[in-house]
Amino acid sequence: MPPFIFDWSDGPEEPNMSRERVAPFCVQGLDTEADRASKDWETGRMSRVKHTEYAKEVLTIEIEQLGKVRDGLNADFDRAVEMILEQLKCGGKVVLTGVGKNLPIAQKIAATLTSTGCPSVVLHPSEAMHGDLGLLLAEDIVIALSYSGASEELLTLLPAIKRCGVRLISFTAEPDSPLGRASDAVLLIRVEREACPFNIAPTASTTAALAVGDALAMVLLKARGFRREDFAKLHPGGAIGRALLLRVSDIMRTGERLARVPRTATVRDAVLEMTRARSGAVVVVDESNALAGIFTDGDLRRHLDDFRNIAERPITEVMTSRPIGVQSDALAVDVLHIFEKHAIDDLVVLDAQGRVAGMVDLQDLPRMKIL
């Protein structure tokens, strides 16, 4: 049943039929439609709802609002970076705080800062007023997140922060708010609308706060000269850390695990050597152990059209001459980049004199927890 519609343009059909008498019919018609929609939802009959399309609309809104926040960054961002750098030089740390949805955003920003060499902690406003304020030192700097800049819990904390002589940076949409006015630098997180259809649930605004936090962390990383090696030292237990700390010499195949044949070998010799070493490739060397080429199982498959004669063919006729190589003192992470860039599975390792020192097999890396 479609919703009840009454056209008042020509007046009611009955002289005594008022709007008040028509209203129940309207409500009844609308209720029927709502009931049907509810039942469709419960039974999964929402074919007209484009879930993926709506998800894209949400992401489009957030992307647009991020662009506006990006364009709104000003000299206060530079001031915030300089203040943080000054406090870090004094042995201080970054203390982030916020309430509601901003608290987990503050936790993520603190984690990113800490993992990139900028010591950071999170201070819960309520817990701060009951003893946790003790972690705040004069050398520290506080970053407070509040879209309105008027969160009661944060405003209660402000006098205590000022008594500690700590400088304050705020993430807020309202620079003239109590939080904004109390701040030494204000990073604007102003969005025109949330991605929520009611424009209520913090979505675009919290995404913007997180993104500005990431931007701040990366700018600080660059300003402090933080290197890949520094990152690896802070992540020794993960695949990223291992890839950044280990050298090629730590992961390459050598000795009995290295498949190697001379230039005089045949394809049969090469395949037998690959089988012995359980390798997908064999290195071809000359008399001085200098690299002459590489022969892989892929090369073998590409020559199978001549399978009757392939076994006795000289390896030099089917190998890949001048293969990609890497120095033994290179970082393991460099090997990952080479594998990805050139779409290869085996990489020859050379020593300082250009002689074959080993080979890195892509299949070995997961076992070493590098991939």
Image (spheres, grey):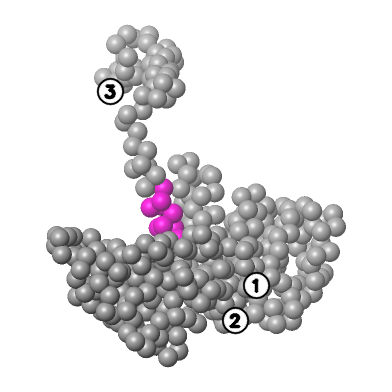
Residue displayed at 34% across by 75% down: 261
Residue denoted by label 1? 118
Which residue is more in the foreground, 59 or 227?
A: 227
In the rendered image, residue 61 lying in the magenta stretch gets the answer yes
**Could you say whether the residue bearing mark 1 is in a helix, strand or loop?**
loop
CA gap between label 2 and label 3 equals: 72 Å
Q: Say what amino acid the circle numbered 1 marks.
A: Cys
Task: Give the amino acid at mark 3.
Answer: Ser
Dividing the picture into quadrants, the one containing residue 265 is bottom left
Determine whether the residue tagged by mark 2 lies in a helix, strand or loop: loop
Which image quadrant is residue 28 in?
A: top left
Residue highlighted by disc 2? 224
Instruction: Tell me if I can see residue 113 in this picture.
Output: no
Tell me: 129 left or right of 238: right
Q: CA distance from mark 1 to mark 2?
A: 9 Å
Specify start and end residues of the magenta stretch as a single range: 58-66
For the N terminus, which image quadrant? top left
Q: Which residue is mark 3?
A: 9
Where does the image place residue 20, in percent across and percent down from the top left? 44, 15
User: Residue 57 in the image: x percent, y percent?
Assistant: 37, 47
Mark 3 closeness class: few <14, some 14–19, many ≥20 residues within 10 Å: few
Would you say the residues marked 1 and 3 are in contact, meaning their CB atoms lie under 8 Å apart?
no
Give the residue at x 37% y 79%.
Answer: 325
The label nearer to you, 2 versus 3, is 2
Closer to the chain start, of discs 2 and 3, is: 3
Query: So how many labels did they put on this image?
Result: 3
For this rendering, which residue is in front, 339 or 176?
A: 339
Left or right of 307? Residue 261 is right
The amino acid sitting under disc 2 is Arg
Q: Residue at x 27, y 63 (%)?
A: 298
Q: Which mark is residue 52?
A: none
Residue sitting at 31 percent across and 18 percent down? 2
